[in-house]
Image (cartoon, helix red, strand yellow):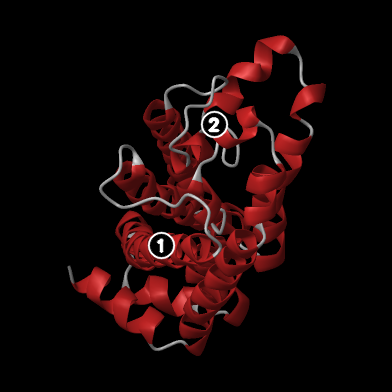
């Protein structure tokens, strides 16, 4: 508990933490406003099938595309900022039990991402539905079928990305390298998914921005019909990366 409290004090005392959270809400809500303000043309110009597949909740939660990178930066900086400044040696001198230190960092990053991410998801939903209603197109209510699970699932998705970022930051020990790897995971690999052999396609059922991102929709996706199972698979994958980070962190000199 002492280590956890120390990590919380350390993280909240950094201006970069608050700048990152400000960017999360600034960019996140900005993307929501942009995506929903132009969505009405898609509805009125679309076919009957397009209107049947209209998902106002999913449209308002598209902010996750940018939000996951911002949350990822936060998770990476929790670890790499100390490597960059050389303070990790001081931290390890004060907390020699490395598994306890890394666990505290992971819990702190996850808690901040969970709270900030969940607030962003609810704020994006309400903002997006207000914009859609103002353009006289169908909007959603929190009590509608599948809406609340999508919003809550969005917060869990962002939390998973934060934990993944902590693991990558620990393994690579460099902010630029960890961020580049995260970008490759969430954007590059899914974009190239068609190049992978058929026997590897199953991994995309729980991949970020693919199967796991189905949690943001209320209209069933035939390619990913079980979004909560997909999201659970993402958390399993993240747990594997974090476990590798614990092993690497304990074996290194610093």
The residue where tag 1 is placed is 117
Q: Quadrant of residue 77?
A: bottom right
Give the farthest residue toward the top. 199
Residue at position x 28%, y 78% in the image: 6
The residue where tag 2 is placed is 52
Image quarter where the N terminus lies is: bottom left
Tell me if residue 136 can be seen. yes
Q: Label 1 crowding class (10 Å Cα cut-off): few <14, some 14-19, many 20+?
A: many
The answer to whether residue 210 is above or below residue 15 is: above
Mark 2 or 1, nearer chain start: 2
Q: Position of residue 243 (x, y in %)?
A: 43, 41
- In the image, taking residue 36 as reference, residue 162 lies left or right, namely left
For this rendering, which residue is in front, 105 or 37? 37
Q: Secondary structure at mark 1?
A: helix
Q: Quadrant of residue 72?
A: bottom right
Q: Position of residue 168 (x, y in %)?
A: 57, 52
Q: Position of residue 221 (x, y in %)?
A: 53, 26
Residue at position x 39%, y 26% in the image: 229
């Amino acid at each position: 508990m002492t280590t956890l409290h120390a990590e919380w004090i350390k993280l909240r005392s950094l201006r970069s933490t608050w700048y990152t959270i400000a960017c999360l809400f600034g960019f996140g809500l900005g993307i929501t406003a942009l995506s929903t303000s132009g969505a009405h043309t898609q509805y009125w110009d679309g076919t009957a099938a397009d209107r049947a597949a209209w998902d106002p909740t999913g449209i308002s939660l598209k902010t996750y595309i940018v939000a996951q990178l911002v949350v990822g930066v936060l998770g990476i900086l929790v670890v790499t900022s100390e490597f960059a400044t050389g303070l990790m040696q001081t931290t390890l001198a004060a907390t020699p039990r490395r598994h306890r230190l890394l666990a505290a960092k992971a819990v702190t990053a996850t808690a901040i991402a969970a709270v900030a991410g969940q607030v962003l998801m609810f704020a994006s939903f309400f903002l997006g539905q207000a914009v859609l209603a103002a353009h006289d197109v169908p909007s959603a209510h929190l009590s509608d079928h599948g809406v609340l699970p999508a919003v809550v699932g969005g917060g869990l998705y962002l939390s998973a990305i934060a934990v993944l970022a902590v693991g990558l930051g620990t393994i690579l020990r460099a902010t630029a390298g960890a961020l580049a790897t995260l970008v490759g995971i969430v954007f590059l690999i899914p974009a190239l998914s068609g190049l992978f052999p058929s026997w590897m396609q199953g991994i995309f059922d729980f991949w970020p921005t693919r199967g796991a991102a189905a949690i943001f929709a209320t209209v069933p996706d035939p390619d990913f019909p079980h979004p909560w199972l997909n999201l659970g698979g993402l958390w399993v994958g993240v747990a594997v990366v974090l476990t590798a980070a614990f092993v690497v962190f304990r074996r290194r000199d610093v």
